[in-house]
């Protein structure tokens, strides 16, 4: 059953279309992520769900009820802010008790509820501290405790991990997954970090220029991007663009300039002459010394122009014979060798037809 | 470069001496056992004793205190509202009305209020002075409060609303406690400006009403006696105390722009 | 803030009280004064009735005509302008090294040094004038030493007090903090790396100041100049107390018109011309400042 429904929501700032006819349906208990670059409209959308901003068009429904005329304080929705927005003049206790006070909880019941909540986020000994006396991770947990203490059915999280360093961020990601499973409420999570989105979410909506480009599960989003933007934004990708010259038996051929004809398995056969692109992950490209490559649908000669050595893997920059730049990711798995190739080495790139993924090229 | 630093420090030292020497002389001569402010004769408390017995002066001090209390209380409320409004809403008229009294020559405000009160047949006196003081103090309070607000994380108010607070609750539980140092600093500033004001008071007080600065003015216009040194010293002490309190409440106040 | 829920009346609840107060006690008096400048002075001071005995509304330009025709007032205006300008320039020369020193000092000492500049500003205005009465008084050490030296050269003794010199010294004294603060606020933001880069590129100390620091500090210079010039232009207490009979400035004439001559229309004209020219000068400074900065940004420095 749909918990939160966003129907045709639009928001303009002057001439700028921040959110453009977005429609989403989020299920009860789902960990749903809005992913996109800054300025794509994801935060504006979140603010409209919370009630800090109003749509110019469309409706937002929670459990089937239109939220339009409810001010933020009357929505059964809580937000974890990017800056955490902990009240600096209140202790941890005061911060977590604040929503209870506002909800007119009998004062006698407040301490027990706060204590229980703080225990839940492992901050039992910190009730008397002020926000500035806490570490970044602890502040984050106070913000979550404050948001959850009144048992909302929907939690909105606005880039909650952006302020943390890499190691802590990873720890908090695991905590967030566990927390969401334990409390069982719906999370709507905003981030620009694709690895974070892939790691945490049940489903992801990729947004660009106010629009939703694709809504899918993380693994499907990575493997089967529908648009060029999604392919490019999620992970790194070789984008081989050109007109479709042939489609037979679910295999399309695209004439890529500076490379040559590339064949790709296409689920839905594109029309001939359509502008398309092949999204090809670097790890799907095989590199071999010239003449040693196994038979494959796509084979191109090239030269190594550079590499980024990353320890476990190496990303090779390859220039195809006709000039098209390519990237190939290889595990450093050769025994006795640090890596396979050096700059200037001639190589042969190859990949099967189903290694790449056909996307519409909306940039043409 | 030590040579450059030396000349810089020397120049700065001269500037500081220029700023403080006159005030030090006033304080020192307030303890001088001589009617002439010319040379040191000996130590005395006589001028303070005379001051304590000077009923006119005490009346003036009482008037000044009363006006400053009323003016700072009212202008703090209005100035805080003005600071909030200027921070939160896009208004065209309010910032002009708030800042203009600070930007224009003081004498203009004095004489225009004089015409205003006389035309309304409003008796010049304590009330007209207080009304005038409130008008020019609002801007100073508003500037301090707005500076405090612009340093505040905007999402705190949203967080309060998100936690279930109405706009009024969010203001009283979150915004007001956080801007309180600015409000107190603004109030102390308004108090000091009011108790020190001469120009606007001069035009709006009328013939019968005397405040401390007006009393000092007539004393130095007629005859300079070291009693003026004594009352000046006390007034400086009061101002200094207020500034110390203000800087304890809002350390950033002394770093932010005053003018 | 939400657009719908904070409500339109919430805005006026906050902005309304100060708006109404300042409208009544600042805007209306100012407007009344503008109208007063077009009216006729009353027989016993103040204003003649707006509607005369003949039923006509009495508004005229007589006071303006008088102001522009009587050379005496133009002279006083020009004199006030020169005093204000001289005050501004002397303040600039004194404030620059002070602001530089404060901006260059350690962070901990900076606040104290700045506080020491602001502190005298918070002491009573009249006390600061009075202090100079003592220092420049005929029996004080300064005047006696000076007249001793003059006497030794066979010159007549001079009076320091009640002179143009006294007025100017006190004008500078009272307004100096207004110049230091904006200058400091500007200099404090300067990036030391720029000076290091200039030195690295071969600029000596003077060149670094004149080609880097000073042009970058121009916004502070203009802001400080406006803050000093405007109040100095309209001052009346300092010439009133420390000046001689020839040192009356425009502020003194305004005071005289309102409290002694009681010619309100003419006093209003003087006040309006004073305010308009002070603000015009400040706007000019701001405009020159912006243009200067724009030119710098365009790389033509």
Image (cartoon, coloured by chain):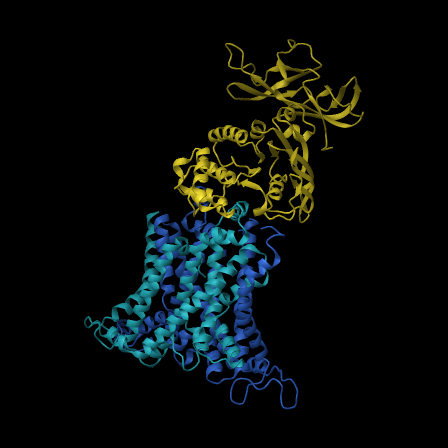
- Tell me, yes or no, if residue B82 can be seen here: yes
The quadrant in which residue A324 appears is top right
How many numbered discs sit on the rendered protein?
A: 0
Q: Nearer the viewer, residue C7 or B30?
A: C7
Q: Do we see residue C147 in this rendering?
A: no
Which quarter of the rendering shows the C terminus of chain B?
Answer: bottom left
Q: Position of residue C149 (x, y in %)?
A: 27, 73
Rendered view: A125 above or below B183: above
Residue B41 rendering spot, x and y as whole percentages: 19, 73
Residue A164 vs residue B220, the one in the foreground: A164
C247 in relation to A163, above or below: below
Residue at 21%, 74% in the rendered image: B33
Where's residue C45, x and y in %? Answer: 51, 86
Q: Could you say which chain is coloured blue in the image?
A: C
Q: Is residue A68 above or below residue A207?
A: below
Chain depicted in cyan: B
Q: Residue shown at 34%/54% (left/top)?
A: C112
Q: Nearer the viewer, residue C135 or C60?
A: C60
Q: Chain A is drawn in which colour?
A: yellow
Please state which of residues C243 and B154 is positioned toward the viewer in this rendering: B154
| A17 up-or-down from A183: above or below | below
Hey, which quadrant is residue C142 in on the image? bottom left
Point out residue A353 in the picture as x, y percentages from the top left corner. Answer: 71, 17
């Amino acid at each position: 059953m749909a918990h939160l429904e966003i129907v045709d929501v639009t928001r303009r700032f002057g001439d700028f279309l921040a959110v453009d006819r977005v429609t989403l349906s989020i299920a009860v208990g789902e960990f749903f992520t809005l992913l996109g670059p800054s300025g794509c409209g994801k935060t504006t959308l979140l603010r409209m769900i919370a009630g800090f901003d109003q749509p110019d068009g469309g409706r937002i429904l929670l459990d089937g009820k239109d939220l339009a005329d409810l001010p933020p304080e009357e929505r059964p929705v809580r937000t974890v802010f990017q800056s955490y927005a902990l009240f600096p003049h209140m202790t941890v206790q005061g911060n977590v008790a604040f929503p209870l006070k506002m909800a007119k909880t009998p004062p006698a019941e407040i301490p027990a509820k706060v204590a229980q909540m703080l225990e839940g986020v492992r901050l039992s000994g910190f009730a008397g501290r002020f926000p500035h006396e806490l570490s970044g991770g602890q502040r984050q947990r106070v913000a979550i405790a404050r948001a959850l203490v009144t048992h909302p059915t929907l939690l909105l999280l606005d880039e909650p991990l952006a302020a943390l360093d890499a190691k802590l961020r990873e720890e908090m990601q695991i905590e967030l997954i566990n927390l969401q499973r334990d409390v069982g409420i719906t999370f709507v999570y905003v981030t620009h970090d694709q690895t974070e989105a892939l790691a945490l979410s049940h489903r992801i909506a990729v947004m660009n220029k106010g629009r939703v480009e694709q809504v899918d599960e993380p693994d499907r989003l990575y493997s089967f991007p529908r648009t060029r933007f999604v392919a490019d934004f999620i992970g790194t990708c070789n984008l081989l663009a050109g007109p479709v010259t042939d489609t037979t038996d679910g295999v399309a051929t695209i004439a890529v300039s500076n490379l040559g004809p590339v064949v790709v398995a296409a689920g839905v056969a594109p029309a001939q002459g359509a502008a398309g692109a092949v999204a090809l992950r670097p790890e799907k490209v095989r590199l071999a010394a010239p003449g040693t490559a196994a038979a494959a649908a796509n084979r191109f000669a090239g030269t190594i122009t550079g590499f980024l050595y990353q320890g476990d893997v190496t990303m090779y920059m390859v220039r195809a014979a006709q000039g098209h730049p390519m990237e190939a990711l290889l595990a450093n798995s050769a025994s006795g060798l640090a890596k396979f190739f050096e700059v200037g080495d001639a190589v042969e790139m190859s990949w099967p037809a189903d290694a790449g993924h056909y996307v519409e090229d909306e940039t043409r | 470069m030590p040579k450059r630093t030396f000349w810089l420090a020397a120049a700065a030292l001269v500037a500081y001496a220029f700023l403080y020497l006159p005030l030090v002389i006033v304080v020192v001569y307030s303890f001088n056992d001589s009617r002439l402010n010319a040379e040191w004769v000996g130590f005395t408390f006589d001028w303070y004793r005379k001051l304590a017995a000077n009923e006119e002066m005490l009346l003036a001090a009482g008037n000044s205190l009363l006006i400053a209390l009323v003016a700072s209380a009212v202008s703090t409320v209005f100035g805080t509202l003005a600071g909030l409004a200027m921070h939160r809403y896009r208004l065209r008229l309010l910032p002009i009305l708030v800042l203009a009294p600070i930007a224009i020559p003081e004498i203009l405000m004095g004489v225009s209020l004089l015409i205003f009160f006389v035309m309304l047949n409003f008796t010049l006196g304590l009330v007209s002075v207080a009304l005038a003081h409130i008008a020019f103090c609002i801007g100073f309070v508003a500037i301090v409060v707005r500076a405090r607000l612009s340093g505040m994380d905007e999402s705190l108010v949203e967080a309060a609303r998100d936690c279930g607070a109405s706009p009024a609750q969010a203001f009283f539980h979150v915004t007001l406690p956080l801007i309180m140092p600015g409000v107190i600093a603004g109030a102390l500033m308004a108090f000091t400006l009011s108790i020190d004001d001469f120009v606007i008071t001069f035009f709006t007080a009328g013939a019968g009403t005397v405040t401390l600065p007006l009393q000092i003015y007539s004393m130095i216009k007629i005859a300079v006696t070291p009693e003026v040194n004594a009352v000046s010293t006390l007034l400086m002490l009061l101002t200094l105390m207020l500034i110390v309190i203000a800087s304890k409440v809002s350390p950033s106040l002394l770093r932010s722009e005053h003018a | 803030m939400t657009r719908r829920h904070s409500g339109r009346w919430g805005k006026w609840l906050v902005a309304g009280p100060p708006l109404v107060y300042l409208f009544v006690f600042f805007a209306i008096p100012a407007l009344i004064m503008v109208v007063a400048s077009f009216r006729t002075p009353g027989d016993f001071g103040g204003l003649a009735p707006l509607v005369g005995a003949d039923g006509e509304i009495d508004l005229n330009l007589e006071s303006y005509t008088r102001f522009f025709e009587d050379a005496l007032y133009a002279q006083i205006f020009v004199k006030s302008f020169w005093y204000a300008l001289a005050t501004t320039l002397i303040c600039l020369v004194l404030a620059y090294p002070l602001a530089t020193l404060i901006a260059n000092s350690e962070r901990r000492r900076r606040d104290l040094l700045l506080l020491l500049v602001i502190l005298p500003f918070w002491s009573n205005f009249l006390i600061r004038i009075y202090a100079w009465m003592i220092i420049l008084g005929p029996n004080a050490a300064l005047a006696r030493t000076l007249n001793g030296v003059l006497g030794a050269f066979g010159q007549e003794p001079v009076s320091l007090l009640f002179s143009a010199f006294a007025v100017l010294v006190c004008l500078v004294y009272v307004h100096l903090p207004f110049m230091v603060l904006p200058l400091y606020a500007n200099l404090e933001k300067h990036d030391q790396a720029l000076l290091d880069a200039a030195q690295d590129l071969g600029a000596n100390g003077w060149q670094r100041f004149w080609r880097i620091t000073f042009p970058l500090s121009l916004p502070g210079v203009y802001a400080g100049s406006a803050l000093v010039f405007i109040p100095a232009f309209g001052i009346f207490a300092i010439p009133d107390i420390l000046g001689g009979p020839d040192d009356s400035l425009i502020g003194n004439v305004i005071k005289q018109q309102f409290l002694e001559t009681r010619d309100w229309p003419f006093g209003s004209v003087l006040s309006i011309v004073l305010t308009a020219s002070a603000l015009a000068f400040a706007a000019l400074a701001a405009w020159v400042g912006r243009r200067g900065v724009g030119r710098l940004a365009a790389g033509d420095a």
